Amino acid sequence: MTDYHQKLLDHFLNPRNVGDIPNPDGFGKAFNPVNQYETDIYLQVREGRISDIKFKSFGCVVTIAAASALTTQLKGKTLEEIFSNKQPLNLLFIIIQNELEVVPPENWHCPPAAAQAFLLACHDYYKKIHDEHHVMKIEALLKEVQSYFEKRLKEQNAQ
């Protein structure tokens, strides 16, 4: 059994922002092909700021903890803070890593699903407001996540 760090366990045992948002401004459902778990993220955006963010996840300790950590740290941020970063996907991973402190290397295939669900929720939001620039930017980021999952699947199948 993996020995998890205290902050990671706290986010698993006491997940923050669990639930859904009726009529969300953005919704994303991510399926992690490596471990077969799902994570949903619901967004409420007011004046460009994430006023509320919730998640539901069917997953392992790290999958749930990562979604809790990400939603906790994103609530209150502006979408521009995230997407004006030169590497927004890296930023999302750093946010998760910093909040959980330690993610065992063998479990790093779990956090990308939280990032993917968030990106899908943002994609949904930007489509609704007809912001094609952000839609295309997020589609490129989603391809990066998909490539990451494909690489991990190949590594898993090679073992």
Image (tube, rainbow, N blue to C red):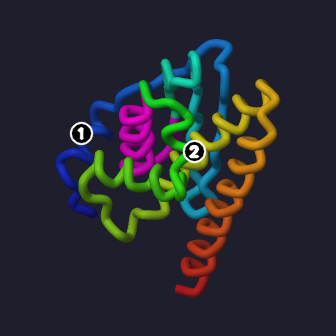
Sequence-first disc among 1 and 2: 1
Give the residue type at disc 1. Answer: Asp
Give the residue type at disc 2. Answer: Phe
> On the picture, is 74 further left or further right than 26?
left
Q: Write down the residue under mark 1.
A: 10
In the depicted view, which residue is nearer to us: 106 or 76? 76
Find numbered disc 1 in the image and state the secondary structure of the residue it sits on.
Answer: helix
Q: Is residue 109 magenta?
A: no
In the depicted view, which residue is nearer to us: 82 or 2? 82
Picture layout, residue 79 above or below residue 48: below
Q: Position of residue 66 (x, y in %)?
A: 40, 46
> On the picture, is 23 further left or further right than 129?
left
The span picked out in magenta is 57-75
Q: Position of residue 3 (x, y in %)?
A: 21, 60
Q: Nearer the viewer, mark 1 or mark 2?
A: 2
Picture layout, residue 149 above or below residue 135: below
Total numbered badges shown on the rendered structure: 2
Main structural element of the magenta stretch: helix, strand or loop?
helix
In the depicted view, which residue is nearer to us: 113 or 26? 26
> On the picture, is 135 further left or further right than 57?
right
Residue at 76%, 43% (x, y): give it: 133
Picture layout, residue 97 above or below residue 67: below
Res 111 label:
none
Res 83 label:
2
Query: Residue at the left extreme?
Result: 6
